[in-house]
């Protein structure tokens, strides 16, 4: 046998060595299409799950609202049994804790929908003297455009302005609490469309809170610090701008005289 005849032929194993080149041709689009389909199915399933969860949440909130409205109706009927405003306020104080879990849930979820329970509980907290809690609820209610029930003849920001101002002017709120509540009420309602008289009253109350003055307790401006006088004056001037009958003209004059003194401290 010649040398040429003895040259071995390529083995079958070497003939089957896989091609190291990347997949090309018709296989690549098929793989990409499969991946796209899987991703699309996953997105659709995730969307379905989220939509189903959202529907359940909305259904649960509606159910809770209906329960709270039924309870509110019963509480209103009980309040009609009282002739005394004082006794009605005492009854509201006793009823309000029953709404706390619902209110806290709404404040956390912030659905932003009309809610007569939230509006009513806000007003009841004001009636009960729980001004900090009332403004906590008001912050959400005003941002959500919630309107008070039909029996109230004022919009929500006007109620906040009127009631907070009345509490400070009457001395129900005083000291640091009055300053804090007045500042927050002004921040929440200053840009709202409310009667000038209501807004003026709140500015007057804020000025009086700075000075430590109430309807039953006047103050000597000479005993007030220069800082307090400087803070109170623009508040009372703004009250005067909004309503010339605000009853702050003499306070403004006394403050201006106090601040004009060179020895003022």
Image (cartoon, helix red, strand yellow):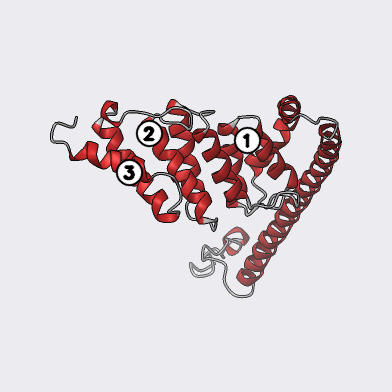
SS under mark 3? helix
State left or right for residue 250 relative to residue 73.
Answer: left
Residue at which label 2 appears:
210
- Nearest the viewer among 117 and 151 is 151
Q: Residue at x 56, y 44 (%)?
A: 162
Asked if residue 183 can be seen in this view, the reply is no
Residue 1 in percent (x, y) is at 54, 67
Residue 56 in percent (x, y) is at 79, 47
Counting other residues with Cα less than 10 Å from the Cα at mark 1, is it few (<14), some (14-19), or many (20 or more)? many
Residue 153 in percent (x, y) is at 69, 52
Residue at which label 1 appears:
126
Name the image quarter holding residue 23.
bottom right
Asked if residue 21 can be seen in this view, the reply is yes
- Nearest the viewer among 143 and 198 is 198
Name the image quarter holding residue 128.
top right
Residue 33 in percent (x, y) is at 66, 68
Instruction: Please identify, in this view, whether the residue under mark 1 or under mark 2 is nearer the observer.
Output: 2
Label of residue 154 in the image: none
Residues at circles 1 and 2 in contact by the CB criterion of under 8 Å: no
Q: Residue at x 63, y 54 (%)?
A: 145
* Up-down relation of residue 15 to residue 176 (above or below): below
Which of disc 2 and disc 1 is earlier in sequence? Answer: 1
Which of disc 3 and disc 1 is earlier in sequence? Answer: 1
Query: What separation in Å lies between label 2 and label 3 (alpha carbons)?
Result: 13 Å
- Quadrant the C terminus occupies: top left
Query: What separation in Å lies between label 1 and label 3 (alpha carbons)?
Result: 29 Å
* Up-down relation of residue 138 to residue 97 (above or below): below
Residue at which label 3 appears:
252
Instruction: Please identify, in this view, whether the residue under mark 1 or under mark 3 is nearer the observer.
Output: 3
Farthest residue, direction left: 262
State left or right for residue 82 relative to residue 140.
Answer: right
- Nearest the viewer among 259 and 143 is 259
């Amino acid at each position: 046998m010649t040398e040429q005849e003895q040259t071995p032929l390529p083995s079958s194993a070497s003939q089957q060595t896989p091609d190291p080149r990347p997949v090309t041709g018709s296989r690549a689009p098929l793989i990409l299409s499969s991946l796209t389909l899987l991703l699309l199915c996953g997105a659709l399933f995730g969307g379905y799950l989220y939509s189903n969860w959202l529907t359940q949440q909305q259904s649960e909130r509606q159910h809770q609202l209906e329960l709270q409205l039924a309870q509110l109706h019963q509480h209103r009927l009980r309040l009609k049994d009282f002739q005394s405003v004082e006794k009605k306020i005492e009854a509201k104080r006793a009823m309000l804790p029953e709404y706390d879990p619902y209110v806290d849930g709404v404040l956390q979820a912030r659905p932003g929908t009309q809610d007569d329970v939230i509006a009513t509980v806000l007003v009841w907290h004001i009636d009960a003297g729980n001004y900090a809690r009332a403004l906590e609820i008001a912050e959400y209610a005003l941002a959500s455009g919630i309107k008070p029930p039909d029996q109230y003849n004022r919009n929500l920001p006007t109620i906040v302005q009127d009631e907070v101002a009345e509490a400070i002017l009457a001395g129900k709120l005083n000291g640091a609490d009055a300053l804090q509540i007045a500042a927050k009420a002004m921040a929440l309602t200053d840009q709202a469309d409310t009667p000038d008289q209501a807004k003026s009253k709140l500015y007057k109350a804020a000025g009086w809170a700075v000075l430590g003055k109430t309807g039953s307790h006047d103050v000597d401006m000479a005993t007030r610090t220069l800082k307090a006088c400087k803070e109170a004056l623009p508040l009372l001037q703004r009250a005067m701008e909004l309503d010339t009958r605000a009853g702050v003209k003499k306070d403004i004059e006394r403050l201006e005289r106090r601040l004009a003194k060179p020895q003022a401290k």
